[in-house]
Amino acid sequence: MARYLMQRIITMFLVAFFVVTATFFLMRALPGGPFSSERNVPEAILKNLERRYNLDKPLHEQYLDYVKGVIVWDLGPSFKYKGLTVNDVINRGFPISAKLGGISLLLSIVVGIPLGILGAMNHNTIGDRAISGGAILTAAAPSFVIAGVLQYVFAYKLGWFPSATWGGGQLRYIVLPILALSSYNLAWIVKLTRSSMLEVINQDYVRTARAKGLRELVIVYRHMIKNAMVPVVASLAPMTASILTGSFIVENVFGIPGIGREFVQSITNRDYTVTLGMTVFFCLLLVGFTLIADIVLAFIDPRVRLEKEG
Amino acid sequence: MRRFVAGMLAVLMLAAVGCSGQSTTAPDEMVIRMNIGTNPPSLDPRVTTGLPEAHVQIALWEGLMRLDEDGNAIPGAAERYDVNDDATVFTFYLRDGLKWSNGDPLTAEDFVWAWKSALDPLLASEYAYQLYYIKGAEEMNTFTSDPKWENASDEEIAAEFERLAENFGATAIDEKTLRVELEAPAPYFLSLTSFHTYYPVHRPSVEANPEAWFRNPETTVGNGPFKIVSWTDKEKVVVEKNPNYWGADEVKLDKIEFYLIEEESTVTTMFETGELDIVESGVNIAELDRLKAEYPNELLILPDLGVYYYLLNVEKEPLNDKRVRQALALAMDRNAIVNEITKGGQMPAYALVSPGIPDETGPEKDFRKNAGDLFAEDVAKAQQLLAEAGYPNGEGFPKLTILYNTSEAHQKIAEAIQEMWKNNLGIDVELTNQEWGVYLDSRSSGDYEIARAGWIGDYIDPMTFIDMFVTGGGNNDTNWGHPEYDNLVQTAKRSADQAERMKAMHDAEALLMDEMPIIPIYFYTRVIMVSEDVEGWSMPLTSPLNLRDASIKQ
C-alpha cells in the first residue's frame, strides 16, 4: 500500500512537471503578450515593463526560474493585476470557489444518488421516466441558461435573493449560484446512478440474495448500492476537481470572485504566470482527487486491488 | 421523491430568504451603488490605464485642476495658476491647508515626487508618456532603451534616473507653489493635470510597500473627496466621505460602492431590481430596445471621444491605390450600421476626429463641426473610382479579408460591410476573426489587409487622434505615411497659437481623409443608466463618472 502510494505521488508530480513545461512553452508560442493593447505602449516603456517582469531574459532562463518558483510554491507575480501574486489569486479565489463547489457537489450527491436509485427501482414507470427525462433536460441545458432563468425568476420576478455578488458567502447570496452550479452534476449523478443500478439489478448475486429471502431494503442497501457506486465514485474525482476550481460561467453570471474566471481571462490577457499557476494548481487537484478515488474504490470494490497479490 | 426534492429546495430557499433583510448600511446614510465593470488591475494612479479604475480614482484623488460638468478645467488642489504667453511654463498655487486623507499635510513637493516616480523606468508605468509634456520627462523614462543599459543593475538605473531628474521640469518653489516647465507649448496641459497620471501619491505610504500599497486601505492615502474603506477583488470597492478633503462641505454622499461585475445581463438585472443606482459599464446592448422603452429617463446616451474605423494595409495590393481605398470608404451605408446594428446612438463618421473638441477658431467652436464631413457616401462615385483603378464593376478585384477580434458586435458590422461592398461595388471580401492577442499581433506586424480598429482619445484636443498616423507612429498600423502630414503635425505640436495649430490639424485631417489609409465608420457613444434619484453627477467627455457633487433625492 505504501509503495503504491509513493508511486502514485511521484507520478502525480511528474505529470504536473510535464504539464507546467508544456503550458509554459505553448503560452509563449501564442502571438501577443501581456502588455499588448489596441493603444500600443511606446517601445521604450515596453522595454521597461519587460525588464520589470523579467521578460527580457532568454526563454530558457525564464523557464528555469519558473520551475524553481513552482517547487517552493512561489508562482510569481500577475502581469495584469499589479501587486498581486498568483499565490494571492489562488488563496483569495479558491476558498470561494471551493465553498460554492463543495456545497453544490454535496447537494448533487445527496439529491442525485437517491433519485437515481429511485428511478432504477421503479424502472420504466412514469416516475422513472420523469426522473431520467428531467435529468437529461437539465444536463442538456447550458449552465448560463439555468443561471439566467434562476436569476430572472428568483431575483428579478420574486425578489427573494440578490441578483449577484458573493456577499461574503452569506446564505441568501449563494443559493442561486449553488443551484446553477449543481444542476449539471446533479443530473449526471442521477443518470449514472440509475444506469449502474440497472446493471446490477439482474446480476446473479442479487438474484441469490433475493432467493435467500432477504428483505428488499437490505438487498438494495447491502448488495446493490455498493456495487452500483463504483462508477459513480470513479467519476466523482474529476467532478470534484473541476467543480472546486470554479465555473467560469456561473462565477461570471453571478459576479462571484472565485478562480473559475481567472483561468479563462488570464489566457486572453496573456497573463502567463496566472495561466501557468492555475494549470499547475488544477492539475495537482485533479491528480490528487483521482488518487483518493482510487483508494476509496479499493475499499468498496472487491475486484480492485491497490497492489499486486503476493 | 420529486416532492421531497421540491420541498427541500423550498425550505432551503425560505431559510435563505429569512436571512435576508439585514442591510449593510445604516438607513440614514446616503450611498450610491455604481457598476464600473471590471476589477481594477491596480489603483495606483501613476500606472493604471483604464476607465474602470479611473472612476474609483477620481473619488480618491484630485489633481491640481479638476473638470467641471462641461469638461472645463477648474481649480482642484491648486487654487489658481499662472501661465506664460507661449504656454510653456505653468505655475500652480496650492490651496491653504491641504491635507491627505490620513491628515498629513499635502505640499507641492508631493506632486513633484509623484510625477517623478511615475516616470521611473523601474516602476515601468504604461502611461508614463502622459507626463512627457514636462521638460526632461521623456528622457528620464526612456533612457533605458539605449542598449548600454541593457545589462545594468537596478541601482545603476536608479542612479542615472536621479541624475536626469535634476533637470526635471516640475519643481516645488515652496510648499505651496509648483512650477512646471514644458517641452513644447501645450495649451491643454491644464486639463491634463486633472488626469489620473497627474494625481499626487502619498510618498511614505508608497515607499512603505512599493509593490502593493494600493491593495491595503491603510496605505491607500489620497487627497480626493472620498477615502477608501475596502476593496474586495472582483466584487466591489467601497469608499466613504473624506473629512480631510478641502471641499468636504460640498460633498453630500456618505459612501459609494463601486461594483465590479462584468456580465451585462446581470448588471442590467441589478439595476432593474434596484440593487444598483448607476450602471456606467454593463448596459445590456442586446436588450437596448426594451431598455430604451422602459427606462426613457434612466437610459442615457452620451458622446464619447472615440472612433470606430477600418485600417487599410496600404502595402497590400490593390489597397496601395488611393482610388481603391476611397471607393471602399464611399460604398458604405453608415447610417444602416448605427441604426440597425450598433443601435447605441452612435454617429456615422465621415472624418477621423470625433465631435466634442473645442475649436475657437471657427464659427461652430467645435473642431468637427468647423470642418464638417470630409467625404460623403456616394456609390456611383465609388464605382467610378474602382473602374479608374482598373476594376470596373469589381471585375478582377482580388479577394481581400477583413480581420476583426472575435466578438459578435464586430462580426455583425463586418458582415454588413461585406454585403454593402458586394452590392455596391461587386467585390467579394472574406471575414476572419482572431482572438484578441492574436489579432493585435497581426495588426501590429502588418499581417492583414483590412482590419477593424477603435480609438478612444486621451485628451480633449484633435492631436489625440491626428498624431496617430504620422509616418511610423506607434499606433499607425496602416504602413501609410506622408511627409506633408508629418509636417502639419509638427507645426501643430510646436505652436502655441491656437489658430495656427487648428489650421494645421484641419489640413492634416483633410489630407488623411483624401489619402484614406483608414475608413472611419462611426463615432462612439457611452451608454449608461442612472437612477432618476441620483443628482449632481457629471461625466464630461473622456472623463470618469464624477460623484463629488452627487446626492440622492430624498
Image: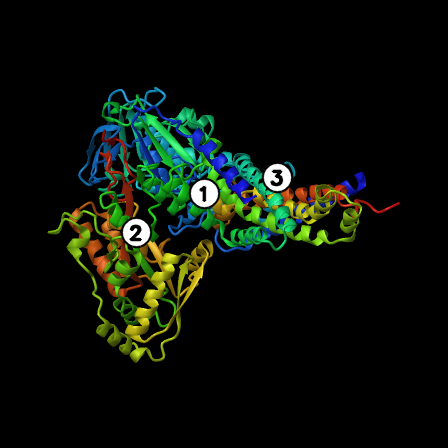
The residue that mark 2 highlights is B288
Mark nearest the camera among 1 and 3 is: 3
The quarter of the rendered structure image containing the C terminus of chain B is top left
**Amino acid type of disc 1?**
Thr
Q: In this view, does B119 lie to the left or right of B70?
A: right
Name the mark on residue A69. Answer: 3
What's the chain of the residue with tag 2? Answer: B
Q: Position of residue B317 (x, y in %)?
A: 38, 72
**Which residue is at a point 17% across and 58% down the rendered structure image?**
B372
Nearer the observer, B154 or B189: B189
- Single out the residue that lies furthest toward the right: A310
Q: Mark 2 and mark 1: span between their CA atoms?
A: 49 Å
Dot 3 crowding, Cα within 10 Å, few <14, some 14–19, many 20+: few
Q: In this view, does A306 lie above or below B344?
A: above
Q: Position of residue B553 (x, y in %)?
A: 23, 31
Residue B125 appears in which quarter of the rendering?
top left
Mark nearest the camera among 2 and 3 is: 2
Nearer the observer, B79 or A217: A217
On the same chain, marks 2 and 3? The answer is: no
Q: In this view, does B247 lie above or below B436?
A: above
What's the chain of the residue with tag 1? Answer: B
**Amino acid type of disc 2?**
Leu
SS class of the residue under badge 1? helix
SS class of the residue under badge 2? helix
Q: Mark 1 and mark 3: span between their CA atoms?
A: 28 Å
Q: In this view, does A175 lie above or below B404?
A: above
**Amino acid type of disc 3?**
Gly
Residue B383 appears in which quarter of the rendering?
bottom left
On the same chain, marks 2 and 1? The answer is: yes
The residue that mark 1 highlights is B144
